[in-house]
Image (spheres, grey):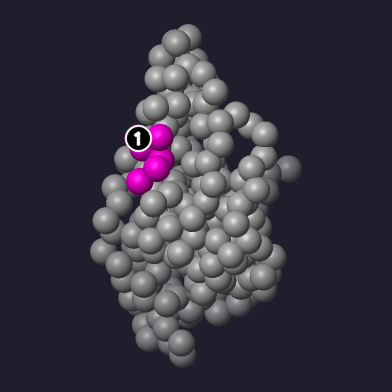
């Protein structure tokens, strides 16, 4: 038996002001989240992006084609009620940050990592007062407690919508520092994504491409770029 799918019933989509932000209406009826919460967005930019997704629906609602709506629903239904848990999960990446672990060999790979990653660690030290230690190999290296406290404070200062974006930026890249950098306009998204893929790209250069791995990497890249877009429209940063 096929599952029920919501079909388009509305003729008009509009962005409206709502208490605490902006909402989206379908034939003057407010859109709600899957948990039946009010879909109140922090910026008009986000509301307009969601309205565009609902306007684009032709026959059946397909959440896979509505990424901004999905992310906003997650921020309201999942992240906001579990803010402390999500913030703790993200902040924990600082203790094992990808950028702190360099290759033992070959030397060329370690040098390339240093050239790309050291400036990001320097930025975190300046921006957050959070200097992190670097090592070679996979044996865990202890990080300064004060640095981790400061990075955690930066994560906890975010809104649920920003935290939703940062969650994906960090989990996809494996780096809290890189994820935080992706929230700043001075850093290029594509460059940051490539910086998170040093080991994988090195393996590809040595052994050639694997079609499935390439496809998976492309999907992760697209998700990373979308997470930055969601961050940008969470505070009208464009």
> Disc 1 marks which residue?
115
Question: Residue 146, located in which quarter of the rendered image?
Answer: bottom right
Residue at the location (45% across, 26% down)? 110
Tell me: residue 144, above or below residue 78.
above
Q: Nearer the viewer, residue 27 or 38?
A: 38
In the depicted structure, whether residue 100 falls above or below residue 60:
above
Give the magenta-colored segment's residue range. Answer: 114-119
Residue 97 x/y as whole percent:
56, 46
User: What's the residue at 63%, 61% (across, down)?
Assistant: 145
Q: Which residue extends farthest bottom? A: 19
Q: How many marks?
A: 1
Say if the magenta span includes residue 118.
Answer: yes
Report the magenta stretch's main SS. helix
Q: Residues within 10 Å of mark 1 (few under 14, many from 20)?
A: few
Q: Can you say which quadrant of the picture contains the N terminus?
A: top right
Of 158 and 117, the residue lying toward us: 117
Q: Residue at x 36, y 37 (%)?
A: 116
Residue 58 picture location, percent across and down? 40, 53
| Front-most of residues 95 and 157 | 95
Is residue 112 in sight in this rendering? yes
Which quarter of the figure is the C terminus placed in? bottom left
Q: Secondary structure at mark 1?
A: helix
The x, y position of residue 236, in whole percent, is 31, 71
């Amino acid at each position: 038996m096929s599952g029920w799918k919501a079909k388009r019933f509305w003729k008009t989509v509009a962005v409206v002001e709502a208490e605490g932000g902006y909402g989206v209406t379908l034939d003057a009826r407010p859109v709600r989240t899957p948990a039946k919460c009010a879909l109140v967005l922090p910026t008009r930019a986000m509301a307009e992006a969601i309205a565009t997704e609902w306007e684009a629906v032709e026959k059946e609602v397909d959440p896979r084609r509505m990424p901004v709506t999905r992310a906003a629903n997650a921020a309201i239904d999942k992240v906001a009620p579990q803010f402390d848990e999500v913030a703790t999960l993200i902040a924990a990446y600082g203790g094992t940050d990808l950028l702190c672990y360099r290759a033992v060999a070959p030397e060329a790979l370690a040098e390339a990592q240093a050239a790309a990653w050291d400036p990001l660690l320097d930025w975190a030290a300046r921006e957050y007062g959070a200097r992190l230690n670097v090592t070679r190999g996979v044996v865990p290296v202890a990080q300064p407690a004060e640095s981790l406290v400061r990075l955690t404070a930066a994560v906890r200062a975010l809104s649920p919508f920003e935290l939703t974006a940062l969650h994906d930026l960090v989990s996809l890249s494996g780096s809290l520092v890189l994820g935080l950098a992706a929230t700043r306009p001075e850093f290029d998204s594509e460059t940051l994504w490539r910086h998170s893929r040093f080991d994988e790209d090195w393996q590809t250069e040595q052994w050639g491409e694997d079609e499935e791995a390439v496809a998976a990497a492309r999907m992760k890249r697209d998700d990373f770029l979308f997470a930055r877009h969601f961050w940008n429209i969470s505070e009208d940063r464009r």
